[in-house]
């Protein structure tokens, strides 16, 4: 049992009581229904987006978004980050497209505008921008570039609920975005995620891909298109695309609605924890110059300022000794371009330029949990110990 786990028990007794009350209702429906739609509306209102579709994981959201890229743009190249989650890349290769890796900036773990520009070709169909570790990655210039080039801009916000750029929440700038409600994230629905957009046509296709490609999941107007075009098909079982079954359940939505009530407070606590963490670390030993403006930190980053294998081993040993749970690399395990599913030759991929910063994070970076039960005293005490092992 860790004294400082990655995440505290973020399902409260009140959450459990609300779920029990829901279960006890007579003739209750558990599959995708009224509560799912209620949660979708609540999330849209909180985020500030027109359309939200609740799915069974943030990773499922990656597959839906990439399916939309393929549906609207065809097969081609997708610019992706080496620092992110496997589904950011797996969704690309499994749909027959080619990921093009570009390097990240250490200040926010995200791919840079200059690197993106250098990787764009006439084959580029989309850009996957991951707001990694709860740092903002978006810029006005990137939004303009994607529009000018007619490239779909995807925001992966799975670790970044409530991150802002210019006072506006991320997940509202790109053409598509996804969020995760996995147990370790800002709020949880046990398993779950959403796909968001302001584009009404994309929204129709998100709902299609979520549920087998069935037109009955879409608006009456969209359904009418297919009724007129295919009059001899049963409108309840008309499949417009080769979709998936990525729906979520009513009980998960009930939990999400309850958790959403304290999301803003959770974000505020995490932001404060990061501030204390970075102020307390020795900046000569550990990188601390992160872009904190608008952050909603997922975890507390601990990346060595320099390449030092011996120090990295001492840091890991100290964390074990102190009962602090940690993960090497980032939430995705570091540089995805070094993972077996790619380097063993199963899929086609490209690397544009060098991935030096991603490799540094992979080899000399880790993170510890950032949850709402942490105290300022705890954080400062661990930082003091970390600074001590760095001065040996």
Image (tube, rainbow, N blue to C red):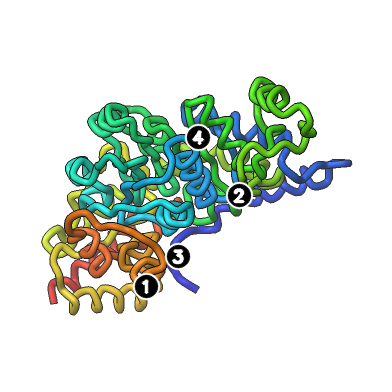
**Disc 3 to disc 2, how far (Cα)?**
25 Å
Picture disc at residue 196: 4
Residue 384 point in image, percent of width and height: 23, 65
What residue appears at the point 27 percent right and 52 percent down from the top-left corner?
Answer: 109
Dots 3 and 4: beta carbons under 8 Å? no
Say which of marks 2 and 1 sits in front: 1
Residue 279 in view (yes/no): no
Q: Position of residue 250 (x, y in %)?
A: 71, 43
Q: Which mark is residue 56?
A: 2
Q: Which residue lies under the disc numbered 3? A: 5
Q: Is residue 150 above or below residue 209?
A: above
Q: Earlier in the sequence, mark 3 or mark 4?
A: 3
Within 10 Å of disc 2 (Cα), the crowding (few <14, some 14-19, many 20+) is many
Q: Are marks 2 and 4 in contact (CB under 8 Å)?
A: no
Q: Residue 336: x and y, percent?
A: 34, 62
Circle 1 SS class:
loop
Specify which label sits upstream in the sequence, 3 or 2.
3
> Label 3, label 1: how many angstroms apart (C-alpha)?
34 Å
């Amino acid at each position: 049992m860790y004294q400082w786990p990655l995440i505290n028990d973020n399902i409260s007794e009140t959450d459990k009581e609300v779920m029990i009350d829901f279960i006890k209702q007579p003739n209750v429906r558990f599959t995708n229904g009224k509560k799912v739609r209620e949660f979708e509306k609540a999330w849209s209102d909180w985020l500030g987006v027109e359309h939200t579709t609740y799915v069974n994981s943030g990773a499922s959201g990656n597959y839906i978004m990439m399916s939309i890229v393929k549906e609207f743009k065809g097969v081609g190249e997708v610019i992706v980050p080496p620092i992110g989650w496997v589904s950011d890349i797996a969704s690309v290769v499994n749909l027959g497209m080619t990921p093009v890796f570009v390097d990240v900036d250490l200040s926010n773990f995200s791919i840079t505008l200059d690197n993106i520009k250098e990787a764009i070709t006439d084959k580029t169909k989309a850009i996957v921008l991951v707001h990694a570790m709860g740092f903002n990655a978006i810029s006005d210039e990137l939004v303009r570039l994607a529009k000018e080039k007619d490239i779909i801009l995807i925001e992966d916000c799975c670790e970044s609920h409530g991150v802002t750029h210019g006072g506006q929440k991320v997940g509202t700038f790109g053409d598509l975005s996804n969020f995760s409600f996995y147990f370790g994230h800002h709020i949880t629905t046990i398993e779950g995620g959403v796909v968001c957009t302001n584009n009404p046509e994309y929204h129709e296709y998100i709902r299609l891909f979520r549920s087998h490609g069935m037109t009955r999941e879409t608006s009456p107007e969209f359904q009418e298109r297919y009724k007129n075009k295919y009059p001899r098909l049963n409108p309840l079982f008309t499949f417009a695309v080769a979709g998936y079954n990525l729906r979520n359940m009513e009980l998960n939505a009930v939990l999400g609605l309850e958790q959403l009530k304290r999301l803003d407070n959770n974000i505020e606590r995490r932001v404060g924890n990061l501030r204390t963490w970075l102020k307390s670390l020795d900046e000569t030993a550990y990188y601390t110059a992160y872009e904190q403006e608008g952050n909603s930190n997922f975890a507390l980053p601990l990346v060595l300022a320099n390449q030092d294998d011996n120090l990295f081993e001492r840091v890991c040993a100290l964390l074990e000794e102190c009962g602090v749970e940690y993960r090497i690399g980032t939430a995705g395990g570091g540089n995805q371009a070094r993972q077996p599913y790619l380097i063993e030759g199963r899929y086609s991929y490209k690397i544009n330029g060098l991935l030096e910063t991603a490799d540094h994070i992979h080899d000399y970076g880790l993170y510890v949990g950032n949850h709402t039960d942490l105290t300022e005293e705890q954080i400062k005490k661990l930082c003091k110990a970390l600074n001590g092992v760095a001065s040996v």
